[in-house]
């Protein structure tokens, strides 16, 4: 692929001014786009960009800066370097509040130290055959019930010592007897509670059946009264935010991170010609009037007349006619002689050949109609009022004849053919500069386009041979030629990734990274690209950004649709929806065959058509 005129140069935060210059010069491009990451210290101060600007001006390189660093953008603009601020940061999601936990404080129960020590000691005895060799097995089994009700205040791992705990045999026996009596009372209470009167199972199921019946009736009423309405978004995307001339970065290497188009600039000169034939004959001046004028000089000094000096005469219609001297002429001076008869003066005299400046019979003049002489750089000389006297006989030869003259109409008849050939030649020249096995010229970026060639400003001035207003050389073959020239520019992209296809993802990503996003939080952003323009230096797009809910209509619009239907008869509901249409909030709608609509919003189901 041929060398490109524009390159994308990503930088690193550690780059210095010298390393930046080295990267730019390595591209050998005359137009460079710098992607400067935040915190690039070398370019945060104006002095760094001043050095960069001076070096690039000396190299003849134009630079465009993209950065999310405000200091970098400010420093670039202070040095008159074109820059575009971007913002790739995303607002962090606020942390969720810690879940509230309900804590219930139980009342503290204090055990007697001796009881606690006793229970703790019991925990150290193996559970299996714990009291196998003890005659009072029931007593110790009852005491085990205390193990799960308190905590020991004594040191861990301490075995039970009845003497240390202060238990005597009498106290232990009494405690066991009390436990048995309490267990007997509990059993009696359980027996009394467990003897209620038996009830029929059908009576227990009756409340459940009643609830199911009520729920079924509620569902049936809901389904019978729920109304579905289908509404489509407005055809003209209400709320669109148009944009124009948005600059999209280029990245020939394809490392732009999804926000740049992978493309390389290409330029080529083209020329094309088309021949035409003059269609009509025109009666136009053909013959040119020629003749002589006699100049008499009444002074003794000779006067030179350079070629191109003009004589002015009047024709029969009183119109001014100009004649030019064919060759340099010197008018001799007057000669004075003395004789017996006295003094006599002979005027200097010369006959000068002249030719009318314009052809045609209008240049024919009568006798002694030349009255003024114009010598370049001098005041007009009038016959009889100066040192010159002019006389002339009739001057003729001017005439008209039918001729084939090139007209503007003749040129316009073949100009379209020439411009079509010019565009095709320009495309071929662009394609010749790339490797077509890997790349292709994107047709949407070719400039001038076939449409733009309708403007004469898009191509060089026409070359018409013979020129407009001039006759063709051979009246029997009245052919003329029109030649057009222009410089074509375009972008070369990978064969499977046209600019239009890339913009389907690049344009939304480009606008999504901007700090001043067009859509609010919770809204769905839609990006529409209507125009793509490549001027040889920048790729710009025109279009619009639309914001709406995920269903296609905003939450506010859906609420207005429900409000137009709520509790209204059919005629009033249709009138309300037509008002929303006129306001550009909704497009087409479909109402069910109902005479009126529910009074509650939850019974109105608004569906959005695609």
Image (spheres, rainbow, N blue to C red):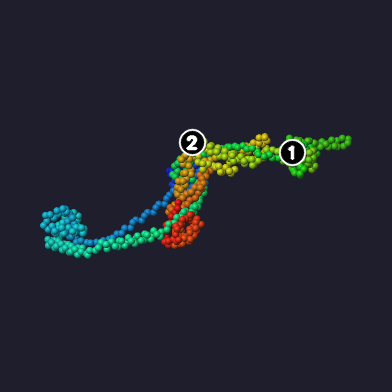
**Residue 272 in sight from this viewpoint:** yes
- Secondary structure beneath dot 2 equals loop
Decide which of 377, 108 is in the foreground and name it. Answer: 108
Name the residue that disc number 1 marks.
398
Residue drawn at x 48%, y 61% is 572
In the rendering, at what x and y percent does residue 473 appear? 67, 35
Lateral position of residue 330 relative to residue 553, left or right: right
Mark 1 to mark 2 CA distance (whole Å): 63 Å
Give the x, y percent position of residue 370: 77, 41
Residue at image location 55% in from the left, 38% down from the top: 424
| Residue where numbered disc 2 is placed | 435
Question: What is the number of callouts on the image?
Answer: 2
Q: Is residue 576 visible?
A: no
Residues at circles 1 and 2 in contact by the CB criterion of under 8 Å:
no
Image: 343 above or below 240: above
Residue 559: image quadrant is bottom left
In which quadrant of the rendered view does residue 605 lie? bottom left
Identify the residue at horizontal 64%, vertical 36% (top origin). 479
| Res 157 quadrant in image | bottom left
Q: Position of residue 372 (x, y in %)?
A: 76, 42
């Amino acid at each position: 692929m041929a060398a490109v005129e524009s390159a994308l140069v990503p930088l690193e935060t550690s780059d210095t001014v010298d390393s930046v210059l080295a990267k730019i010069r390595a591209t050998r491009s005359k137009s460079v786009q710098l992607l400067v990451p935040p915190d690039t210290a070398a370019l945060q101060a104006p002095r760094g960009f001043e050095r960069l600007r001076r070096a690039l001006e000396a190299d003849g390189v134009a630079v465009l800066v993209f950065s999310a660093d405000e200091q970098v953008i400010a420093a670039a603009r202070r040095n008159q370097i074109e820059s575009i601020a971007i913002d790739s940061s995303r607002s962090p999601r606020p942390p969720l509040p810690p879940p509230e936990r309900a804590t219930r404080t139980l009342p503290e129960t204090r055990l007697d130290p001796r009881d606690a020590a006793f229970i703790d000691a019991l925990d150290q005895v193996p559970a299996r055959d714990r009291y196998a060799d003890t005659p009072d097995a029931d007593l110790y089994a009852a005491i085990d019930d205390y193990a799960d009700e308190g905590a020991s205040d004594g040191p861990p791992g301490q075995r039970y010592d009845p003497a240390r705990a202060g238990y005597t045999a009498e106290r232990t026996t009494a405690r066991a007897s009390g436990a048995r009596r309490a267990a007997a009372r509990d059993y009696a209470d359980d027996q009394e509670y467990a003897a209620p009167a038996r009830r029929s199972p059908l009576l227990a199921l009756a409340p459940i059946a009643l609830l199911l019946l009520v729920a079924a009736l509620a569902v049936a009423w809901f389904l019978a009264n729920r109304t579905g309405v289908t509404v489509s978004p407005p055809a003209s995307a209400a709320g669109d935010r148009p944009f124009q001339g948005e600059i999209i970065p280029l990245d020939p290497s394809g490392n732009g991170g999804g926000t740049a188009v992978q493309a390389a600039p290409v330029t080529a000169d083209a020329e094309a010609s088309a021949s035409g034939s003059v269609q009509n004959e025109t009666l136009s001046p053909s013959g040119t009037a020629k003749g002589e004028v006699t100049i008499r000089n009444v002074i003794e000094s000779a006067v030179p007349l350079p070629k191109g000096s003009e004589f002015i005469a009047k024709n029969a219609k009183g119109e001014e006619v100009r004649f030019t001297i064919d060759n340099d002429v010197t008018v001799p001076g007057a000669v004075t002689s003395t004789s017996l008869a006295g003094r006599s003066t002979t005027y200097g005299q010369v006959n000068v050949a002249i030719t009318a400046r314009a052809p045609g019979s209008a240049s024919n003049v009568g006798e002694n109609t030349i009255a003024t002489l114009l010598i370049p750089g001098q005041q007009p000389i009038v016959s009889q009022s100066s040192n010159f006297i002019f006389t002339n006989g009739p001057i003729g030869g001017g005439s008209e004849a039918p001729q084939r003259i090139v007209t503007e109409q003749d040129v316009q008849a073949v100009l379209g053919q020439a411009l079509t050939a010019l565009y095709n030649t320009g495309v071929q020249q662009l394609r010749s500069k790339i490797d077509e096995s890997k790349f292709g010229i994107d047709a949407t970026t070719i400039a001038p386009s076939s449409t733009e060639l309708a403007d004469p400003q898009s191509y060089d001035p026409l070359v018409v041979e013979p020129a407009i207003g001039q006759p063709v050389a051979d009246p029997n073959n009245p052919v003329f030629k029109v030649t057009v020239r222009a410089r074509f520019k375009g972008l070369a992209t990978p064969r499977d990734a046209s600019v239009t296809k890339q913009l389907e993802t690049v344009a939304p990503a480009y606008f999504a990274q901007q700090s001043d996003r067009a859509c609010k939080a919770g809204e769905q952003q839609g990006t529409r690209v209507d125009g793509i323009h490549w001027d040889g230096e920048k790729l710009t797009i025109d279009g619009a950004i639309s914001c709406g809910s995920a269903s296609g209509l905003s939450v506010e619009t859906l609420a207005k649709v429900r409000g137009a239907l709520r509790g209204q008869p059919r005629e009033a509901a249709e009138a309300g929806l037509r008002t929303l249409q006129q306001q550009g909030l909704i497009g087409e709608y479909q109402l069910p065959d109902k005479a009126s609509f529910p009074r509650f919003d939850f019974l109105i189901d608004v569906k959005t058509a695609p």
